Image (cartoon, rainbow, N blue to C red):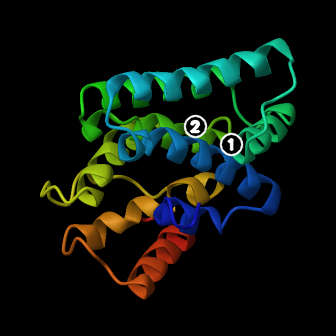
Amino acid sequence: MRNGDEDRWLSSRYAPKPERRALIALYAFAWELARVRLVVTEPGLGAIRFQWWRDTLEAFEKGEKPREHEVVGALADMLAEDRYRLDALKRLVDHYEDAFEDADRAQQPEALLTATAAQVLADAHGWGRHIASLAPHVAALRRGEKVGYGPVVPQAPVSIRPAIAHLRLRRIYGKTNEPGNLSKRLCVMRGAMSGKV
């Protein structure tokens, strides 16, 4: 996960251990979906991969034994602990597949992923609309799009900071496409500590 999505991995380090495991499983699942565009070129092969994940989620729903796969095993454990809802995972598959089919990374469900992660930490936090406006904007900056600093949002609640601290990286992605490792770590740490993203 650290290599696949370092930004979210850095944020997750600030979560208590049980919640951290749930965040990492969720992010690994999202990374598996996002990287379909990197490993296949044929639309049909992409459809097969997304269907595999749908079938896996349906097996969870039916209470069937999960398939042998590192991410599937982690998801199974977290679903057994009621860390997230199956319908949110299904929506992630649908949105990532739409983005793949349209060859448009801007359609990837950044806000849904971030909101699902925040829900792992707190059922009610009052920050949903801020996530919806900020997450896609930060994703655009990560892709190298020049979209400016973005919306001004209030300080994030302490409870969800490990799920959203990486959004603070907009402060450096807006200046450079390749921030250094230390800069990223310090930026995420400030987001986790202050809630100012």
* CB-based contact (under 8 Å), mark 1 and mark 2: yes
User: Element under label 1?
Assistant: helix
Q: Residue at x 70, y 62 (%)?
A: 15
Q: Is residue 197 visible?
A: no
Residue position for label 1 = 120
Q: Which residue is at the front of the view, 143 or 67?
A: 67
* Quarter of image, res 119: top right
- The three-letter code of the residue at mark 1 reads Val
The local crowd at label 1, few if under 14, some if 14 to 19, many if 20 or more residues have their Cα within 10 Å, is: many
Residue position for label 2 = 116
The C terminus, quarter of image: bottom left
Q: Quote the CA–CA distance across marks 1 and 2.
A: 7 Å
Position of 97 with respect to 31 (left or right) is left
User: Element under label 2?
Assistant: helix
Q: Position of residue 42 (x, y in %)?
A: 33, 30
- The three-letter code of the residue at mark 2 reads Thr
Q: Is residue 135 above or below residue 44?
A: below
The local crowd at label 2, few if under 14, some if 14 to 19, many if 20 or more residues have their Cα within 10 Å, is: many
Q: Is residue 119 above or below residue 194?
A: above
Position of 149 with respect to 116 (left or right) is left
Position of 164 with respect to 177 (left or right) is right
The N terminus, quarter of image: bottom right
